[in-house]
Image (cartoon, grey):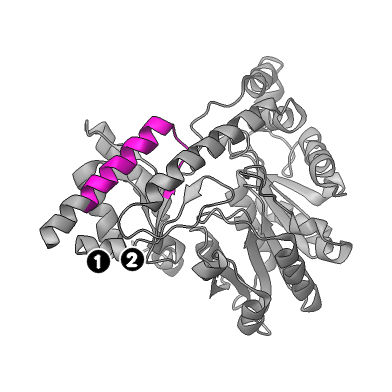
Amino acid sequence: MELSKRAQRLEPSVTLAAAAKAKALKAQGRDILSLTVGEPDFATPENIQEAAIQAIKNGKASYYTPTAGIPELRQAIVDYLKQHYQLDYQASQTIVTDGAKFALYTLFQTILDPSDEVIIPVPYWVSYGEQVKLAEGVPVFVRGEEANEFKVTVEQLEAARSEKTKAVIINSPSNPTGMIYTKEELLAIGKWAVANNILIVADDIYGRLVYNGNEFTPIATLGEAIREQTIIINGVSKTYAMTGWRIGYAVGNQAIIDGMITIASQSTSNPTAVSQYAAVEALRGEQDTVEEMRQAFEERLNRLYPLVAVLPGVKLAKPQGAFYLFPNVKETLTICGYSNVTEWVEDLLEETGVALVTGEGFGASENVRLSYATNLGTLEEAVLRIAQFIESKSQNES
């Protein structure tokens, strides 16, 4: 049977593919150091685990829940946004989803008609463009220059705008670059979006993971008109080490949220019940473990960055948030005798056991992504192997 044209056009996730290959090689007994997936290596905090256990014991986890999420969690989300960012929403303006990824998918299914355009800054998270295409929309890519910390400007957005532009995605802190838009930059983008009636899709999933005195500003906090023009996408995966629990959420315009709820009702029915009760505790419970994990990521960044920055040919600005490095390795490829970053990454894995993600999946053919969401020992050993790989290849070239 022939696959649908939709399925044939879709590109697989390069991050999940790289992680799967690394796991397969490890299962074969290979010594693999994987810096692929953005997944904290911490266990979910015990208070959150205990809340899930109690929900199971009390029989709360045995049944369907409302499509949009249990009332306690929807209220916890608006309380969380009020406490941390002074944003005011009603619980009805939220939808809980099976991960933040599905919140984005459902949003695009809700707002896009065929040929509607979504502006996506480059580098981008690997699923943005593919999800837009799944909704029969058109991704319009705008390159954030490295000289501007990979961030796009209003002038660039305006040049990309057309009568079909429906939305713009702002991911800050960014996956894959770790860069953060300043308040002034976001205000300019927000005013531009309001003036042109363009929906702002604010992917704030890394908002609590910022380092070295840098600050995260949610774009929705920059005035009522901008808030009304914004859909917030977030979840508990990164901040609370809950990637496996699959709980995300969207908050914003009531009509859009209602549309998302309708689509979710015909797809997933509802998020996993026990995970929702765990997420309530994550948002309402003690936050000391969040800070402990943030400090650990900050230490890893500060230890790893100087090691990677001095690798031959590498150009790297220090990230401000998330847990990724996104070095430019164009000169490194030349030193090693390569013309293609994906081939370099594949040979690195095969010859050294270090798994990275090629930048091509993020729209950046001169870069690679390293996740530092793993322990320092693994990170330092991985960089040592990368250095040895570059040295070996450069000697072969000479």
Secondary structure beneath dot 2 equals helix
Q: Are marks 1 and 2 in contact (CB under 8 Å)?
A: yes
Q: Is residue 265 visible?
A: no
Question: Left or right: 265 with respect to 341?
Answer: right
Other-residue count near label 1 (Cα within 10 Å), few / some / many at <14 / 14–19 / ≥20: some
- 380 and 172: which is toward the camera: 380
- Most frequent secondary structure within the magenta stretch: helix
Q: Which residue corresponds to mark 2?
A: 330
In the rendered image, residue 389 lying in the magenta stretch gets the answer yes
In the rendered image, residue 307 lying in the magenta stretch gets the answer no
Is residue 89 placed above or below 273 in the rendered structure? below
Q: Name the residue type under label 2.
A: Lys
Is residue 11 placed above or below 81 in the rendered structure? below
Q: Which residue corresponds to mark 1?
A: 334
Question: Left or right: 227 with respect to 363?
Answer: right
Other-residue count near label 2 (Cα within 10 Å), few / some / many at <14 / 14–19 / ≥20: some
Spot occupied by residue 378 in the image (x, y as percentages of width and height): 37, 33
Magenta segment range? 370-390
Q: Name the residue type under label 1.
A: Thr
